[in-house]
Image (spheres, rainbow, N blue to C red):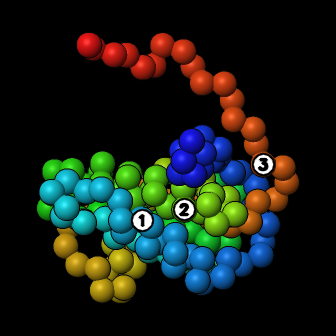
Amino acid sequence: MSDILEIMKSRRSIRSFKKDMVPKELIEQIMEAGTYAASGRNAQVPIIIAVTNPEKCDALRKVNAKFMGQSEDFDPFYGAPVILIVIALKERPTYVCDGSLTLGNMMLAAHELGLGSCWIHRAKEEFELPEWKEFAKSLGIEGEFEGVGHLALGYIDGEYPAAPPRKPGRTYFVD
């Protein structure tokens, strides 16, 4: 079996991270992997934002927890020191799928580099808020876009989870 298939089979969502910051070089490699995700007609509309600033990470945690109906003390990012946000320009009808593939590539790259990750939802709701639209604009991001998802990223705190058995009856052949 090739290395990529083994990486796909062994990757798990991580829900406990050490506070140690991930080196920028590794974050850049993971983001680069995201830019190589397939996209409809190769439009490459997903945008990746790396958030390592503790105050901005806390703001993301609070707004995300609020959307979940949790208190501001709740951490939907499981203590991850890095939050990668994927937004996608709505100019292409495949933008949500394209952004999802971007997140998938980054999860596989993180695993290959010895880091943990977990896809966190509610980016859509966040980036509908004026303050988060303004945040994107402050980075120079223009146009109509939608939040697709976050990737909590960091060093794993604890044991790496084992893969649960695969559910049967999910693949079919039409010969």
- Taking the spot 14% from the left edge, 62% from the top edge, the residue there is 91
| Mark 3 / mark 2, whichever is N-terminal | 2
* Residue placed most toward the observer, 172 or 148: 172
Tag 1 and tag 2, C-beta contact below 8 Å: yes
Category of crowding for the residue at label 1, using alpha-carbon neighbours closer than 10 angstroms: few (below 14), some (14–19), many (at least 20): many
**Residue type for callout 1:** Gly
For the C terminus, which image quadrant? Answer: top left
Q: Position of residue 48 (x, y in %)?
A: 40, 71
Quick check: can you spot residue 162? yes
Circle 3 sits in a helix, a strand or a loop, which is it?
A: loop
Image quadrant assignment for residue 41: bottom left
Q: Position of residue 100 (x, y in %)?
A: 38, 51
Q: Which mark is residue 61?
A: none
* Residue placed most toward the observer, 135 or 107: 107
| Mark 1 / mark 3, whichever is N-terminal | 1
Does residue 58 appear left or right of residue 30 in this picture? right
The answer to whether residue 63 is above or below residue 131 is above
Residue that carries the numbered disc 3 in the rendered image: 160
**Residue type for callout 2:** Ala
Q: Position of residue 9 (x, y in %)?
A: 60, 40
The answer to whether residue 6 is above or below residue 47 is above
Residue that carries the numbered disc 2 in the rendered image: 109
Q: CA distance from mark 1 to mark 3?
A: 23 Å
- Taking the spot 20% from the left edge, 54% from the top edge, the residue there is 40
| Mark 1 / mark 2, whichever is N-terminal | 1
Does residue 10 appear left or right of residue 95 in this picture? right
**Residue type for callout 3:** Tyr
Q: How many marks?
A: 3
Q: Which mark is residue 34?
A: 1
Does residue 53 appear left or right of residue 46 in this picture? right
